Image (cartoon, coloured by chain):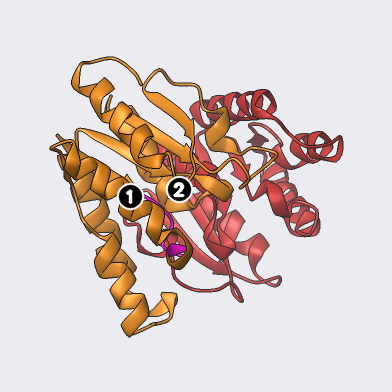
Amino acid sequence: MIVHFLGKTATIAQNADLYNRIKDVIRQGGHTIAYDFSDATYVEMGEGNLDKSDWALLCERDIDAVNRCEALIMDVSDKGVFGMGYMASMALLANKPVLLLIEQSARGGSFTCGLEHPQITRKIFNKGNIEVIISEFLEQCASEDVRG
Amino acid sequence: MIIYLGARTSNLDHEIGVLRSIITAIHISGNSLARNWVEPEFQRLEMRPKPRGKQDWAKICQENLASLEMADAGIFEVSDRSCFGVGYVAALMLQAGKSALFLVRPESQPDGSFAAGLEDPLITWAEYNNENVAEIVAKFMNSIEIGGRA
């Protein structure tokens, strides 16, 4: 499957280890990452402030990735931001499965906690169970994809 | 027309003045809000600051999505990268072919945001301050009434 993974661009550096682990699980499961947002965005952010045209490019990449992917995984710990909500909405409108990851120690309470849709899977994760959560979600998506 | 108003609730104590100006501008132009959540939410925060995690977020989501269906257009405060819920609803609105005004404070996010990069003919983008926000909203309302853009 083609899988798109997203987290907050503003916290890519501090979540680098977590995001690398998530990406490793996706790849080890034989899946393809639609667009590695964390590597590409991090490089661009490191080069200086992003302006409107940079964000237009990032939007275009993300929207293309959501259109191409068969499943979407998002780290929405600490509520998530506009772009992540926008991407989740697009994926669900196309009836694609979406995994919302919420870190165990994250502040509770947000739209991500209340959103109900048959294609949403919402999981609380910690450093010990993130690989299992990702694997199980992808296995479920793949089996439903085969059946579908 | 019926207008959906979207904004973060986590910063409501700072943005209440602007949101009130937007609501007044909507009403003065003869239009109405799909869901007038601002004053009840502000009063709730003032009177009973229940932790965000204790709120009924499923109900909040349902009410938001129901009011979105009623709306003819949307106004979204998207400063500081906004929040998941505002992005979620904005995408639904645009996919439904409804016009949206994105309002951002110029000083809020110097390096932009995802919302700033969205290119859709249904989006009107405007930088605002407390003095001109009512004028911007009125101009947007007028533009969608006549079928054009602000």
Q: Is residue A138 left or right of residue A46?
A: left
Q: Is residue B97 left or right of residue A62?
A: left
On screen, B110 above or below A112? above
Magenta span: chief secondary structure: loop
Q: Position of residue A31 (x, y in %)?
A: 64, 38
Q: Closest to the observer: A61 or A44?
A: A44
Q: Position of residue A71 (x, y in %)?
A: 51, 40
Residue sitting at x 69%, y 46%: A9
Q: Which residues are magenta?
A: B6-12
Residue sitting at x 25%, y 30%: B141
Task: Name the chain letter of the residue that bears numbered label 1.
Answer: B
Q: Which residue is mark 2?
A: B130
Residue sitting at x 31%, y 56%: A116
Q: Is residue A17 left or right of residue B23?
A: right
Residue B21's tag is 1
- Secondary element type, mark 1: helix
Q: Position of residue B50 (x, y in %)?
A: 38, 82
